Amino acid sequence: MRIEFTYTRGPDHFSGYPLLAERNASSIPSYLIASVVGLAGAAIVVVALVEDTVQAAACGVCGLLLGAGIAVATRQRGRGRFVMPATAMTTRRWMINDDGIEIAHADSSVIMAWPAFRMMMALPHAYVFVLKDRADRRTVDIPREPLTEADDAAVREVVARHGITFYSRA
């Protein structure tokens, strides 16, 4: 198998990438905490109104606001975007074969063998590869726009053949 193409990424190419620090983080625990804090605040407000205690009602309103704040912060964190330098959007040449991926541009090139990758995420516009070395936080991507359906299937097949974990974000 050999796939070769030249492509220039646009400024929105990196918008769907998960933030590196949050790659393995789930937002579910944060939403659960927000729900528990919000419900506790609501319960305190109801009891305070029944018992006619202003201080308890104020405490309950604070709990409601804290729960809402946690939920909003969690939602914003999930919408984070990479801010990439202009050099990341220069024209590059990708060459994908049975040995690995080569990405080259005017100044340099990098060759990554398939055994170096731990997982691949399929985003609608790119395949993003994460390295096995957890201390190395770089990622390698293959834009999907220039790929034909046969090329797309070939990339998935070679990834499966090399035992790279595959995730899809459909």
Image (spheres, rainbow, N blue to C red):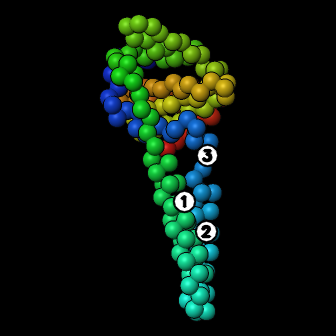
Kindly identify the amino acid type of the residue bearing the numbered disc 1. Ile
Residue at 48% of width from left, 26% of height from top?
A: 141
User: Residue 64 appears at what percent x and percent y?
Assistant: 54, 71
User: Residue 168 appears at what percent x and percent y?
Assistant: 52, 42
The residues tagged by marks 1 and 2 sit, at their Cα atoms, a distance apart of 9 Å
Residue at 48% of width from left, 58% of height from top?
A: 72
Say which mark, if any, is on residue 118.
Answer: none
Q: Earlier in the sequence, mark 3 or mark 1?
A: 3
Kindly identify the amino acid type of the residue bearing the numbered disc 2. Val
Q: Is residue 80 left or right of residue 5?
A: right
* Callout 3: SS: loop
Residue position marked by numbered label 3 in the rendering: 25
Asked if marks 3 and 1 touch (Cβ < 8 Å), the reply is: no
The reply to whether residue 30 is in sight is: yes
Q: Please state which of residues 98 and 76 is positioned toward the viewer in this rendering.
A: 76
Residue at 61% of width from left, 68% of height from top?
A: 37
Residue position marked by numbered label 2 in the rendering: 37
Residue position marked by numbered label 1 in the rendering: 70
